Amino acid sequence: MVRQYPLPASLAQQTDNVAKMRQILGKQDVPIPEGVTVKVHKRVVTVTGPRGTLVKNFKHVTLNMRVMKLRHGDKKVRVEKWFGLKKELAVVRTICSHISNMIKGVTKGFMYKMRAVYAHFPINCVSSEGNTLLEIRNFLGEKYIRKVQMEKGVTVVNSTKQKDELLIQGNDIQAVSQSAARIQQSTKVKNKDIRKFLDGLYVSEKTTIVQDEI
């Protein structure tokens, strides 16, 4: 049996200081492609592109954000955090991911594909109010009509290429994914064994509206 002795107070304090050591500067850049305009004012980011404009407020995070212009004409968004701990530096990468998704949204857009799964009763989906409201009928043979409201800037349509498929489209990935989650939750089977009752609407593919040329 190996006997363990506690560390001296001074050595333990040095160990804690090393574990909590702050990085002087944590930074990350997001390149701005051609045709996209990014403005940063008091941690409010506005991204404008061919598909529209997105605005996100990051005032709840204490860090520095600015648009930088390089010598050869390119631009990028720089996010900085001075003297940050590990979790605070992780926020820098998170904010950059949000800005990158905003740029992708105003250039290519986001599209979630959902498939209707049923064993006996076919699920009928009808979009209304300018493709912003989805009505789900005949779910498990029920007469009750389920209505799901899409998030702002999101539309839902029936696919013309695939049977029993929905297309949820929009520029904001958070709004698109939240709308898809609402649809899936609206057809959640209650008081039944979900391993046997698999009826519902499920996300089958996540892609962009504008596809890259191969």
Image: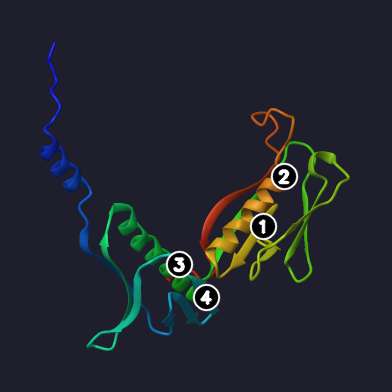
Does label 1 or label 2 sit earlier along the sequence? Answer: 1
**Residue 139 against residue 150 in the figure, above or below:** above
Does label 4 or label 2 sit earlier along the sequence? Answer: 4
Q: Which residue is mark 3?
A: 101
**Residue 90 against residue 192 in the figure, above or below:** below
Q: Which residue is mark 1?
A: 166
Q: Residue at x 33, y 57 (%)?
A: 88
Visual colour scheme: rainbow
Does label 4 or label 3 sit earlier along the sequence? Answer: 4
Instruction: Give the CA separation, mark 4 to mark 3.
Output: 12 Å
Front residue of this view, candidates 28 and 1: 1
Question: What's under tag 1, amino acid-wise?
Answer: Leu
Q: Secondary structure at mark 3?
A: helix
Q: Which residue is mark 4?
A: 55
Instruction: Give the CA separation, mark 1 to mark 2.
Output: 14 Å
Q: Work out which quarter of the rendered image holds the C terminus and state it.
A: bottom left
Question: What's under tag 4, amino acid-wise?
Answer: Val
**180 left or right of 30 in image:** right
Please identify, in this view, whether the residue under mark 1 or under mark 2 is nearer the observer: 2
Please identify, in this view, whether the residue under mark 4 or under mark 2 is nearer the observer: 4
Q: Which residue is mark 2?
A: 187
